[in-house]
Amino acid sequence: MNLENFWFVLIAVLWGGYFVLEGFDFGVGMLLPFLPRDEDERNAMFESIGPVWDGNEVWLVVAGGATFAAFPAWYGTMFSGFYLALLLILFFLIIRVVSFEWRDKSKSPGWRRVWMWANTVGSIGIALIWGIGLSNLLSGVPLDSSGNYIGGFWNLFTGYTVLGGIAFVAVFAFHGANYLTLRTVGDLFERSRRAARRLAIPAVAVGAGYLIWTVVVAVDQNDKDVFPPVLPAALAIAAFVLAAACVYLGRNGLGFTLSAVGTLGVVATLFTSLYPRVMVSSPDFANSLTVQNASSAHYTLAVMSVVAAICVPLVLLYQAWTYHVFRARVGGDGLSGSPEASADSPAT
Amino acid sequence: MPVLASTVVDLARLQFATTSIYHFLFVPLTLGLGPLVAVMQTLWLRTKDERWLRLTKFFGTLFLINFAIGVATGLVQEFEFGMNWSVYSRFVGNVFGAPLAIEGLAAFMLESTFLGLWIFGWNRLSPRLHLATLWIAVLGTWLSAYFILVANSWMQHPVGYKIVNGEAQLTSVWALLSNGFALRAFLHTILAGLIFGSTIMLGVCCWHFLRGRQVELFRKAAMLALIVAVPVTLLQLIVGNRFGEAVTSAQSMKIAASEAQWNTCQPCGFSLFQIGGFTKSDPTPSFSITIPKLLSYMATGSFSGQVQGLNQLQRQERVKYGPGNYMPNIRVIYWAMRVMAFAGVLMFLVAALGAWLYRKGKLERARWFQRTAIATIALPYIAATAGWILTEMGRQPWIVQGLLLTSKANSPNVSTTWLGISLAFFITLYVVLGIVDFVLMRRYARPDRPTTSEELPAPAVTY
């Protein structure tokens, strides 16, 4: 595999990492207005992702930086082309970031409600727009011969891309519910299980529909054969179906693992469908950006490969350790959940 | 349509200036308050003195409120290169993208993950391990600053590259990472961060002294703040000066502009203040206060050194790069330099005075000084803003010194409408965030909050 292809795969991995990890954070955020019956349960939901969401979000920062370094032309075209969509993403990202830090800074119910909704709206918005945005890479956008986007904002919305957005939202909501079944206790746990069951069928249906449509678009718009894109698509659909089955059988751990595999499968399907292009141009297919014509020179890619070879395993290691440290369920063990408990114990 | 084109570039510049200056109001406090909180927690672990724990929690909360906006506005910066400056992004991606990507992978990951561990790890990690997570997060913030400054310094002083097919390609990552300009900028920025941290800590302590609250507790914090503030403010004056020498060799025009030095001089006096003298048609100030030979020393390290004038440099650049105006906005650069330098000196004087009062045991009673110290909180913000205006506007008309003009670097497909929408959007959102942040910081810093460690929440988030 040459370095250009390696970096294409690595960027897919970074997006995959981002959506698997932030995906359940988004799902928890989306369920915030619906699952909890009181403030304690809401706190528990926040706490279930509190220690990890920021580290999870950095996968996006790295995906963005890696695209800038390894495929400058892709970065320049995509970010300037999807301008208003990215502006919306930034808005949702920002209100979501501050909601985590600011919500508990006041006891006022109105204040807490505002930041809870900021988190929910942010989570839905980010998932929706990334789904639409990334689908556009494949379904094609108008590019001129120097690789500049020449469409408008509404060009980004087609049946396929909007389904992509909805699929991301549905899959993450399901993934988040699965996560909560592993991290909560008592009533909240019961309601998380019910939510996972209710969300399973829609997530499988929308997710499968999107995956199949993606393979069709790859064939129609991107000059691909059904194989290989159909492979990750089938894997993802199988994972989602099995995840749904697990949820109904009460196998929550396996259900969460499978919804994570399914999410990875969605990203894999998208990138397999894209290759060897990174951004399809339509109607002028010849203007498409490819792994070859959008990439950095060999030296930069080689340097970055060394850095990635050292850092990525390290990151995986210490992030895994973080999940190990915070593996205990939240809300019922007296160790966590209530601010009083946390504040007292370091002093005792 | 040259008029329209310049509007697009101007709007894109205005937006970058707004968002990056805003971002940098929060970054240096993260860089400086982080290690101070870590030192306090270390002292608690070492001495078992409960007061250090209370101070750790008190300042830790302020640190985290501030940190949140730093993260949120940092995302904007990463996206903005591609959104508004796609020609620039394609031109520099090979070189400039690398430190940005490494920053994410090696520094920001570390910072975010370990800060999460610190915030929520009070009950779950052993005290030593819990302390280690904070130090690692602090290391992450410093590494992060280093890689970002490597990227920025390449725009000021490009090294380790060649131009192939109209784009810059990296030839030596070592040259990029060891760029003398970057190392100096890093030291300058870390010192700035420590000045932010210690100055604001001292101000908050003095606020408590002024109200007579928790005097015993905050005397310890004031001591720590002063131990840091006195040497770093002094060191910054020296380092800032040395940094000037590096700028002189890499960006002569920036130095000439920052002194409004129209003609080459040897030796050159340093102008403290002047009226007029900022335009080519009016090169001689109608009034000025000048210290003889000081500019020669600051720019070259020798009291008899030569500093090239704007007119001479303009002629050289025109020969080298073709017709055009290669001077930045002289008036802005001149004053940005002075605001930064004067603020730096003032902060040193306040710190030195505070240390003297502390030694005399008068700090808790000197109300005039307490008020001064509270007002001094504004100074690091002013100095840092002026410093970045000097750095970035002083590089104009270049976006990458000598390689790419700012006027040719924007996204050609991004219209004034899109830019107008996004600029209005950022300003509105940032004003709201700024107000909420200020109110929260004030509330958590104010003297009449609960004070026993049972009543004080663990730093920030417990949900």
Image (tube, coloured by chain):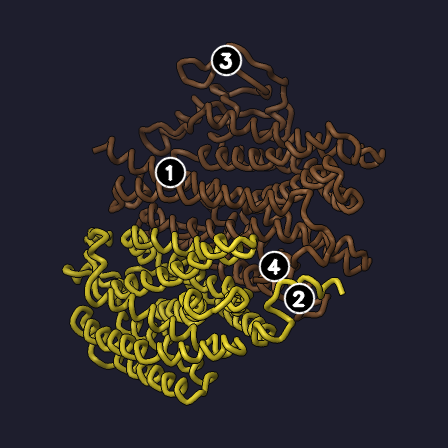
Chain colours: A yellow, B brown
Q: Residue at x 61, y 30 (%)?
A: B343
**Residue situated furthest left in the rendering:** A283
In this rendering, the answer to whether B259 lies above or below A28 is: above
* Circle number at residue A46: none
Q: Residue at x 33, y 44 (%)?
A: B422
Quadrant showing the N terminus of chain B: top left
Q: Are marks 3 and 4 on the same chain?
A: yes
Where does the image place residue A193, in percent across and percent down from the top left? 44, 80
Quadrant showing the C terminus of chain B: bottom right
B119 to the left or right of A131:
right
Residue position for label 2: A341
* Circle number at residue B13: 1
Labels 3 and 1: the sequence-earlier one: 1
Residue position for label 3: B285
Where does the image place residue A337, in percent across and percent down from the top left? 59, 68
Q: Chain of mark 2?
A: A
Residue type, mark 2 in image: Ala
Query: Which one is in front in this view, the residue at disc 2 or the one at disc 4?
Result: 2
User: Cα distance, mark 3 to mark 1?
Assistant: 30 Å
B452 to the left or right of A241:
right
User: Cα distance, mark 2 to mark 1?
Assistant: 49 Å
Secondary structure under the numbered disc 2 in the rendered image: helix
